[in-house]
Amino acid sequence: MAKPTGKTKKSSGSIKSIFIPVIAFLVFSLCFFPIVIAGRLLLYFIAFDKFWHFLLLPFILYIGIAIVVVSLLLISGAIIRLFNIRYKPGIHEYTFKNKNAFKWIIVCSLYTPCRKILEIFPMGRIKNVYYRLLGMRIGKNTLVGGVIKDPCLTEFGDNVTMGEYSCVYGHIHNMEKETIEMKKIVVGNNCIIGAGAFIMPGAVLEDDVIVAAGAVVVKSQVLKKGKIYAGVPAKEIKKKTK
């Protein structure tokens, strides 16, 4: 039996690449159904044939935008959860042929627009619900204030505070080797991640750890329980005081 040629493999990857914008188009189109239904119901009650009806338009538009944003988060998150589109830790070939890389690309196409929206609009508890739909484990009384690049590879314990502009990475590209390395990040209970801090793939923050603002926790670094870390790369500066 003849082996598949490079041309056949390339065409297979090209076909899969077409799926990405199609999937994004279908999913994001579904997200507009709630606002279409709400608009139709609104026209049933308000005919916009009186002047004061038009005075309601700014409020109606605001509510409409809110419905679209919430729908975008919940519907896209529900689809990712329903079809179990989650990638696993490891070093994977960065091609459409690789199962985990392909799943990562699909998630990115759906998650990135939503992530940008979350950076603009404060969504409160809906944000945590969305992250959980994507596979992130979030404990009780936890504030996710920064950017989570790979929710399905991220775990936060109870009473965790993550400051604004901080970022948790679960993957690293190596374009020289054409690979993508994915590692799980675990943040224990009662941890604080300062504003602008970076947590790299494979990092483990044990309970009661404080990461200072602007610090960089490097790949696979383990921060010991009850200590404070700062700097680039993050180094212990002192123990946490109770």
Image: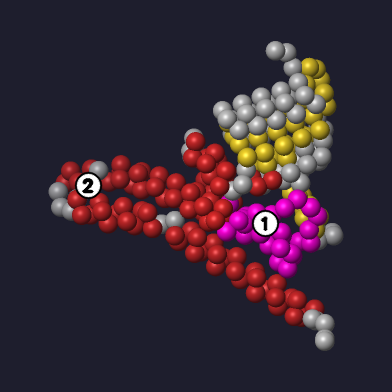
Reply above or below: 89 against 140. Answer: below
Is 137 on the left or on the right of 130, as rendered?
Answer: right
Q: Quarter of the image containing the C terminus?
A: top right
Question: What label does residue 173 carry, if any?
Answer: none
Residue at numbered disc 1:
104
Total numbered labels: 2
- Amino acid type shown at disc 2: Phe
Q: Nearer the viewer, mark 2 or mark 1?
A: 1
Reply above or below: 239 against 110. Answer: above
- Amino acid type shown at disc 1: Trp
Viewer-proximal residue among 217 and 239:
239
Residue 146, given in percent of the width and then of the height, sits at 62, 36
Q: Quarter of the image containing the N terminus?
A: bottom right
Label 2: few (<14), some (14–19) or many (≥20) C-alpha neighbours in 10 Å: few
> What residue sits 18% from the left and 43% below the top?
52
> What residue sits 44% from the left and 56% below the top?
31
| Residue farthest right in this picture | 177
> Is there CB contact under 8 Å for labels 2 and 1?
no
The residues colored magenta run 83-111
CA gap between label 2 and label 1 equals: 45 Å
> What residue sits 70% from the left and 78% below the top?
11
Residue at numbered disc 2:
54
Place residue 55 in its image quadrant: top left
Reply above or below: 188 against 35. Answer: above
Q: Secondary structure at mark 2?
A: helix
> What residue sits 81% from the left and 55% below the top?
91
Residue 28, given in percent of the width and then of the height, sits at 48, 58
Is 171 on the left or on the right of 121, as rendered?
Answer: right
Tell me, yes or no, whether the highlighted magenta stretch contains residue 99. Answer: yes
Residue 119, given in percent of the width and then of the height, sits at 55, 41
